[in-house]
Amino acid sequence: MISVHYSNYKSFLETHSESILDYCNTIAKKYSTKNIDSLIKNYFNGFISDFEDLLKASPEKLYKIKTYFDALPLADRELINKDFDLETLYNYFINGIYENKKLGIKYSSSYLADNLDIFACPYCNENFTYSFRYKAGVNPVRRTFDWDHIYSKTDYPFLAISFFNLVPCCKVCNFIKSDQNIDFFNPHQNINVNDSYFFLLNPTGAGFITDTSKLELNLVLIKTKYKDEFKNSISTIGLLDRYRTHKEIIKDILNKQRMYPLTYIKAISQQLPLSNSSSLSQLRTTLYGTNFNHQYYYKRPFSKLTFDILNYTKP
C-alpha cells in the first residue's frame, strides 16, 4: 500500500468535474445539477454541499460520507441507493461520452489513464500500471490496470464517479478486492506509508543470501490512526503472501546491498558533476531500479519493499 498524493492525479480534478457537470446540465439532464443537488439535500445535507462537492470530495470527506451512510437503517440505505445511483455516469466515463469544450478534448477513463504518471499499483506496488495502443480497431486502448472504487459502486452507487474514490490499480488487486465492503486505505491521502508499516526480513538460517528457502519475509504494522485500514487492505489483497513469492527479487536486493555498500555509492557520487545529495539519490535509484522517496513509490514497483529491506536488514 502506497500513497499517490504526489502524483499528477489530482491535477485532473477540475477537468473531471467540469466535464461531468457540463454533460449532465446540457445532455443527461436526469443527472442535472438541480436534480442531484436535490438528492444531496434530502439524503446528505451537512455532509455534501452540492453535486460539484460530491465529485471533488476529498478522501477524508468520502470516508465521513461512507461512515454516515453505514450507520443509517437498512431501509434508508436501500432507498438512497435506489434514488441516488450514479453508476451510469461512471459508465459514461469508461465509454468516453464526456466532452470538455474548454480544453477541446473527449474526457474519459482513457484520457485520464494516458496522462497519469502513476506507473505502479497503489495497492500492491508489485505490478506496473499503464495504458497503451494495441493495433488499430474499435477499441485500441489496452491497460494493465482497472479503475477500482475504494468504496464499491455496488454498495455506494452515489460515490461511483467521485474522483478520489477511483484508483488505477493492477488487475490482480482489482480482482481480489472486488466489491468487498471494508475500511480500505485510500492511496490519495497525503501520508508517509513508512510510518504505518514496513517489511521485515528474518533469515531462518545461514546462507540465506544464496539459499532463498532460508528467507522469511514478514510485515509489521505500526500503531497509527490508519493501522486498521492498512491491516484490512493488506489482508484483503494478500500482500504479504504475494511478496513472499518474490524471493529471487529479495535475493537480488540483498546481493546489491553487499556488493554496493552505501559508502561505496557515496564515493562514486562525489565524482559526478551533480550535487552530492542529487547524485547519491540518482545512483541508488538507478542501481536498484526503484524510488527511495516515499512520495514517489508510485513510479516503480517494489520501491517500498526495497526501501524497507535496505533500511531494516544489516548487510
Image (cartoon, grey):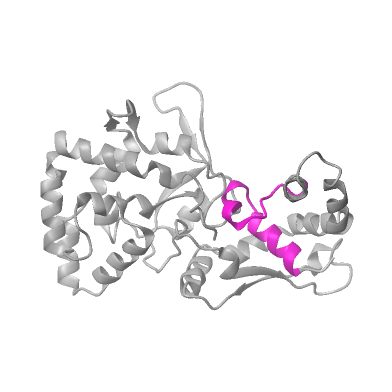
What's the magenta bit mostly, secondary-structure-wise?
A: helix
User: For residue 46, what is the image quadrant?
Assistant: bottom left
Please determine whether, in this image, residue 103 is positioned above or below residue 55.
Answer: above
Along the viewing direction, whichever of 148 and 9 lies nearer the viewer: 9
- Chain part drawn in magenta: 287-312
Q: Assess whether residue 307 is covered by the magenta stretch.
A: yes
Where does the N terminus fall, quadrant-wise?
A: bottom right
Question: Horizontal and vertical percent for residue 55?
Answer: 28, 50
Q: Is residue 226 magenta?
A: no
Percent x, y of residue 114: 47, 34
Figure check: 298 above or below 185: above
29 above or below 214? Answer: above
The answer to whether residue 252 is above or below residue 101 is below
Relative to 99, 183 lies left or right: right
The percent position of residue 147, horizontal first and vertical second, equals 41, 47
Residue 75 position in % (x across, y down): 15, 70
Residue closer to the observer: 150 or 205: 150
Residue 245 visible in the displayed image = no
Picture residue at 31% right of the left edge, 56% below the top: 57
* Quadrant holding the C terminus: bottom right
Residue 18 visible in the snapshot: yes
